[in-house]
Image (cartoon, grey):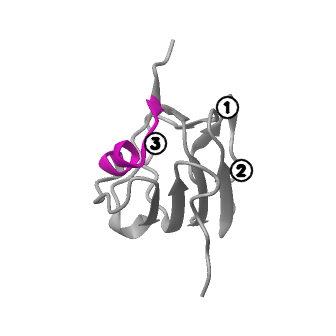
Amino acid sequence: MEEIVKIDSIAQYNAMRGVTTKHPLVAVIDHSKAQPVPARSFNFGLYAVGLKELSGAQLRYGRKHYDYQEGSMIFVAPGQVLGVQPGVEPLAPKGYKIVSRNAHSVVLSN
């Protein structure tokens, strides 16, 4: 059975992506400046909202494959399991992701 890696903190997620942690409760990540997500499954203890500018990625959502289209948005809540298929090109999209420890940490304004 495949090991599922638990991601419980912003610092842990940022370390996996190779980016600096500037705040313990929220991160805004530019995918073009981060390391690709490794090929394995993750159980997220975080909220995330991402805009992905890619197509053809091999991402699993639970036990099914996620149908990525160009310009897709993805939403993740604590307890959800996502994974990148092994043996395929690493997931290195363009776009941005907001990752938060809780749903009330992020307020967006211009």
* Proximity of marks 3 and 2: CB atoms separated by less than 8 Å: no
Q: Which residue does the numbered mark 2 point to in the structure image?
A: 67
* Proximity of marks 2 and 1: CB atoms separated by less than 8 Å: no
- Work out whether 82 lies above or below 29: above
Magenta run includes residue 104: no
| Structural crowding at the residue carrying mark 3, measured as other residues with C-alpha within 10 Å and reported as few (<14), some (14–19) or many (≥20) | few
The one nearer the camera, 71 or 28, is: 28
Considering the image in quadrants, where does the C terminus appear? Answer: bottom right
Q: Which residue does the numbered mark 3 point to in the structure image?
A: 88
How far from the left and from the top, in percent, is residue 26? 47, 58
* Mark 2 or 1, nearer chain start: 1
- Work out whether 29 lies above or below 44: below
Which amino acid, mark 1? Answer: Gly
Which quarter of the picture shows residue 33?
Answer: bottom left
What's drawn in magenta, residue-wise? Answer: 6-16
How far apart, in angstroms, are the residues tagged by discs 2 and 1? 13 Å
Q: Which mark is residue 18?
A: none
- Work out whether 70 lies above or below 56: below
Element assignment for label 3: loop
Q: Main secondary structure of the magenta part?
A: helix
Element assignment for label 1: loop
Which quarter of the picture shows residue 64?
Answer: top right
Magenta run includes residue 8: yes
Nearest-to-viewer mark from 1 and 3: 1
* Mark 3 or 2, nearer chain start: 2
Q: Which mark is residue 62?
A: 1
How far apart, in angstroms, are the residues tagged by discs 3 and 2? 16 Å
Residue 36 visible to an observer of this rendering = yes
Give the left or right position of residue 22, taking residue 82 as reference.
left
